[in-house]
Amino acid sequence: MHNTLSNVVLADDHAVVLAGLRSVILQSPLLTVTGMAQTITDLMELLRSVPCDVLICDFAFYNDPMPDGMQLIRQLRRHYPHISLIVLSSYDNVTMVRQLMGLGIKGFISKTSHEINQLPEIIQRIHHGENYVDSQTSLALLNHIINNDSKGSGSLAELSSREIEVVRLVVDGMSVTEIAAYLNRSLKTISGQKKKAMRKLGVNTDTALVNVWHKLNGQH
């Protein structure tokens, strides 16, 4: 396999994560870290000013005034389609991962996966046309397909990507009004998406919504 020199940008809201990722990336002489960002604003500025072949980006940026999650990924894919995007996230439910891959990201790695230490090799594989999902998430995806979970009741697979986004922010403690402002959507739209999600998940209180979200994401 022919190796390729790559410029890598890292984005995560935790400095310790950025330091760890940088250390792993620089183990390879074929990779260089051209920038690191802890906020979405800084990330967008970096992408306008430094070379970037590969972006390793978190899914959720807590307390960031700029929209994260699916909206961020859509924005990155729209404005920087030439960049190979690897999403690194603690949100690893299979429905979300499938939706992310559908948006055209090249890789997904759960933050709980030891395969983060294999990032130099993963980047080379992506450069040669492969998509990459860490093994534990791949297994969950396979089980999801085999068990045909999408037909079951109370599954995140029943939610649209926008409904998942709203539920995630509710679980993070945001009100419907705050979510509407954060995602730049109307209060009516956000309220409707929240109600639809709750109906699909079979819950009628915010507490129950939080509990079922954690249960379906394997969190306790």
Image (spheres, rainbow, N blue to C red):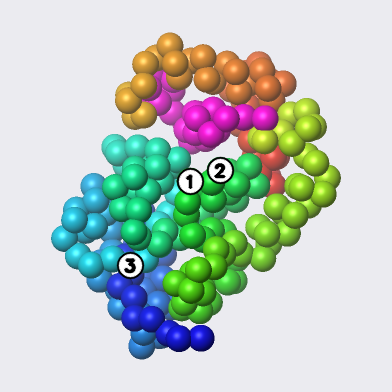
Dot 2 falls on a residue whose secondary structure is helix
Q: Specify the quadrant of the image occupied by residue 63.
A: top left
Q: For the point 60% across and 23% down, which residue is it?
A: 197
The amino acid type of the residue labelled 1 equals: Leu
Q: Secondary structure at mark 3?
A: loop
Residue 2: % across, % down: 45, 86
Q: Determine which residue is flagged by label 1.
A: 103
Residue 106 visible, this angle: yes
Residue 171 in view of the camera: no
Q: Amino acid at mark 2?
A: Gln
Image marks 3 and 2: residues in contact by CB distance under 8 Å:
no
Question: Residue at position x 73%, y 59% from top?
Answer: 139
Element at label 1 = loop
For marks 3 and 1, give the CA distance. Answer: 18 Å
Disc assigned to residue 99: 2
Q: Is residue 152 above or below residue 125?
A: above
- Total count of labels: 3
Residue plotted at (30% across, 39% down): 66
In this rendering, position of residue 206 left or right of residue 3: right
Asked if the residue at tag 1 contacts the one at tag 2, i.e. Cβ–Cβ closer than 8 Å, the answer is yes
For mark 3, what is the residue?
A: 53
Say the numbered circle drawn on residue 122.
none
Can you name the residue that lies furthest to the top here?
A: 188
Segment tinted magenta in the rendering: 158-180
Kindly report the secondary structure that dominates the magenta region of the rendered protein.
Answer: helix
Residue 206 as seen in the image, left or right of residue 136: left
In magenta segment, residue 169: yes
